[in-house]
């Protein structure tokens, strides 16, 4: 019996996907269990650390500044109306570096920022442009080359094992945006983040939100499932609990990711994953119907006015170290 790393509860079978969501090749790391107590999900079995690098050797991936999304059908009148309605109901909060800097009460040029799992540095570039000293922790040398080209200091490593050259430093702002779900040991990664944050500093952690209705509808062919790169699966409940478990004081939450659920390119990308799952014919969770135009409109009507935890595909928390 597998036990939850967060609360010790029993992990039960949850989802099963026989293929890698990006390469469409068979993978032994496509099945997930979920804790019945705290909602935390994880791939079972977990891969060995030395296997992770191979999962990111892709023709296109967002940490390299590239897109893997399908173009989708050309927009028609119906699509434009649907997307406009979705836009009007989208009240999500994008991360705003200027607002985060303002929360510190210090000028940007006196602040240091670390992004753990920073990819090619999209967030760090924004902080740097505002005058903050930006640095990244990133395992991928290709992404690291992009950081160097942008004039951003970076350290090679992962959240669970930061290099010694980094461990004697602290930062005013530490971010983990869409990196915690990639960690084999997210508890240890958060403890690393905690140790690298100055007392009174700001920690930001954002992950996919597996409690949202879009994920519940599409599950294993959701863009947010993405096994075997995503190894842990969070809801607002489990993410908040894990951040607190690592010693942080949670000070706020935010949600984002709504309009894109309904757009043609997003639907085409998810439907392509679904088609490849069917072609593989391996053991799988029950598959929802193809994500059609009418299905997108039904989901929009269902989600337009629900709670943020059910509406948005990403959840984030602000926290501090006392």
Image: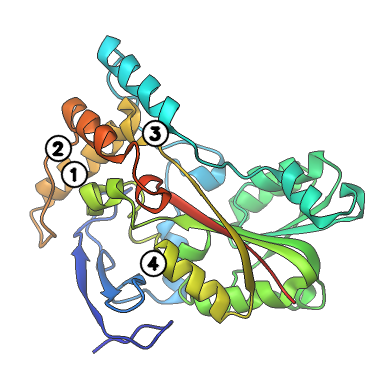
Rendering coords of residue 201 (x, y %): 77, 66
Residue 59 visible in the shown view = yes
Instruction: Name the residue nearer the viewer: 247 or 22.
Output: 247
Q: Which mark is residue 108?
A: none
In the displayed structure image, the side of residue 199 where residue 272 appears, left or right = left
Q: Nearer the viewer, mark 4 or mark 3?
A: 3
User: Which picture quadrant has residue 294?
Assistant: top left
In the picture, which quadrant includes the C terminus? bottom right
Separation of residues labelled 4 and 3 (CA atoms):
23 Å
Q: Is residue 205 positioned above or below 243 on the image?
A: above
Separation of residues labelled 4 and 2 (CA atoms):
25 Å
Q: Are marks 4 and 2 in contact (CB under 8 Å)?
A: no
Q: Which mark is residue 290?
A: 2
Q: Nearer the viewer, mark 1 or mark 2?
A: 2
User: Which of marks 3 and 4 precedes in the sequence?
Assistant: 4
Separation of residues labelled 4 and 1 (CA atoms):
20 Å
Which residue in the protein does label 1 denote? 274
Which element type, helix, strand or loop, lies under badge 3?
Answer: helix
Which residue in the protein does label 4 denote? 231
């Amino acid at each position: 019996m597998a036990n939850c790393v967060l609360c010790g509860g029993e992990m039960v079978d949850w989802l099963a996907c026989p293929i890698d969501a990006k390469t469409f090749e068979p993978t032994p790391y496509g099945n997930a269990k979920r804790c019945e107590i705290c909602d935390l999900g994880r791939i079972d079995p977990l891969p060995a650390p030395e296997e992770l690098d191979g999962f990111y050797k892709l023709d296109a991936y967002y940490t390299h500044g590239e897109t893997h999304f399908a173009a989708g059908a050309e927009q028609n009148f119906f699509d434009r109306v649907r997307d406009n309605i979705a836009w009007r109901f989208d009240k999500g909060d994008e991360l705003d570096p200027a607002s985060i800097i303002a929360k510190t009460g210090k000028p940007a040029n006196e602040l240091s920022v670390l992004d753990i799992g920073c990819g090619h540095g999209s967030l760090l570039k924004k902080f740097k442009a505002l005058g903050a000293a930006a640095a990244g922790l990133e395992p991928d040398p290709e992404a690291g080359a992009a950081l160097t080209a942008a004039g951003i200091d970076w350290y090679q490593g992962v959240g669970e094992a930061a290099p010694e050259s980094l461990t004697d430093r602290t930062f005013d702002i530490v971010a983990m945006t869409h990196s915690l779900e990639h960690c084999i040991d997210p508890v240890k990664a958060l403890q690393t983040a905690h140790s690298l944050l100055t007392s009174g500093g700001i920690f930001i952690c954002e992950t996919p939100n597996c409690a949202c209705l879009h994920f519940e509808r599409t599950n294993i062919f959701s863009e947010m499932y993405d096994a075997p790169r995503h190894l842990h699966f969070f809801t607002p409940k489990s993410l908040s609990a894990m951040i607190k478990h690592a010693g942080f004081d949670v000070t706020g939450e935010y949600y984002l990711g709504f309009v894109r659920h309904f757009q043609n390119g997003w639907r085409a990308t998810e439907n392509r994953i679904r088609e490849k799952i069917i072609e593989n014919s391996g053991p799988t969770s029950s598959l929802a119907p193809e994500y059609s135009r009418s299905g997108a409109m039904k989901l929009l009507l269902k989600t337009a006015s629900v709670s943020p935890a059910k509406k948005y595909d990403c959840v984030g928390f602000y926290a501090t170290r006392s």
